[in-house]
Image: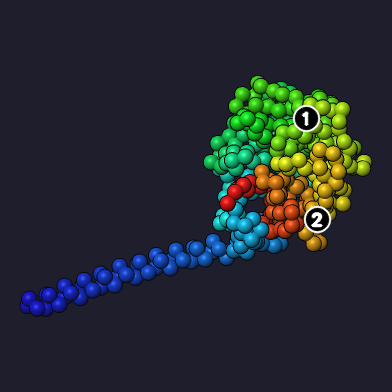
Amino acid sequence: MAPMNQQRSISSGLWVTLAKGMISFLILMAALWGFFLLIFSPIQSSNHQETVVIKEMVEGWKRLSENRRGRVIYARPPRLLVLDLQTGREQSIPHIEVEGGQGRKLRGLTPRPFFAPDGKQFIYRYRDRIWIGNLDGNKRELKNGLMDTTKETRWSWWRGNDIDWAVGPSKEGNIIMINISDPSITKTIYNGGDVKWWCEVTGNGKYVVYDTGTDIYVTPVEDRSLAIKISRRQSCRPCAAPDNRVAWLPASHIRYHIFNAVNGQPLGKLLAPPNEGIYRLNWSNHPDFAVHMFGSAENQRMHVRRISTGGRVFIGYGWDPDLWVESTN
């Protein structure tokens, strides 16, 4: 009987080996299928008639940026999301809720997030208050009684001499800086009293661009006597670059006008993609890259842009995108 028992033992061992191999094979196939879905499946979101294929977006960003790391933060109220442009991975930031949506009233409530220079923290607005958050979902309110935090306002993040500041409009119509570590510390960098909603400081901290409600002006920090008007009876969403450039959006929403902040001279235009428009352009921390959305009704299409070439990559749908780009390879 020993040979038969030995034969049964060998047969049993063979079946166990085959079963283990089959399980390993199924696990491998499931992993490959998951990878396939990640690369080739579209980013899905409600009420959108188009999708973005992750593989195409990743390859497009790689070409556009010369393989830099990049991430975009944006809102699909009530969620705030971040998109890794190298992998195409989109994640909802936990524990953070935002407002906004279709219609003029709701559009004014959107969070207007703005990345810190490290791309890990950000400043945003929620329920007429300003908050500091990070990608893990930790948040704290930035409180200072001088800050104008009402709808339509946008606060940006500026770093100088290793100190982080929130920059935005005051209730008196000035431009102020609030120390992020100690919000009781305040600086006034423009005291004209005519700022309405939008203002930003250039990355080198030397110039501010702002909206008066009727026009866009650029001026050296703390010297309002040298203010230069760079618009013609229009005022819409000015933004500042990391260098000495500023831009603003004319009413047609098909281009952004770019100016030299030093002398107010025009430097060119950033045109919208074909058959589209630009709405809420934000310069990144890198002087040659920006991001914008278009559409204030159902589909808020987002593109990342290279300023020097006008190149673009469609990245999906969301409100108020802001872009962080690796400065060096």
**Disc 1 or 2, which lies upstream in sequence?**
1
Please tell me in which quadrant of the rendered image residue 24 appears: bottom left
Q: Mark 2 falls on what kind of element?
A: strand
Relative depth, front residue between 201 and 302 = 201
Label 1: few (<14), some (14–19) or many (≥20) C-alpha neighbours in 10 Å: many
Q: Position of residue 253 (x, y in %)?
A: 84, 51
Residue 94 located left or right of residue 49: left
Residue at position x 30%, y 67% from top? 20
Q: Name the residue under label 1.
A: 221
Relative depth, front residue between 154 and 67 = 67
Residue at position x 63%, y 64% from top? 56
* Count of marks placed on residues: 2
Q: Position of residue 198 (x, y in %)?
A: 79, 37
- Whether residue 105 is visible: no
Q: Mark 1 falls on what kind of element?
A: loop
Indicate which disc residue 258 carries.
none
Q: Nearer the viewer, mark 1 or mark 2?
A: 1
The color scheme shown is rainbow
Label 2: few (<14), some (14–19) or many (≥20) C-alpha neighbours in 10 Å: some
Indicate which disc residue 271 carries.
2
Amino acid type, residue under disc 1 in the picture: Val
Amino acid type, residue under disc 2 in the picture: Leu
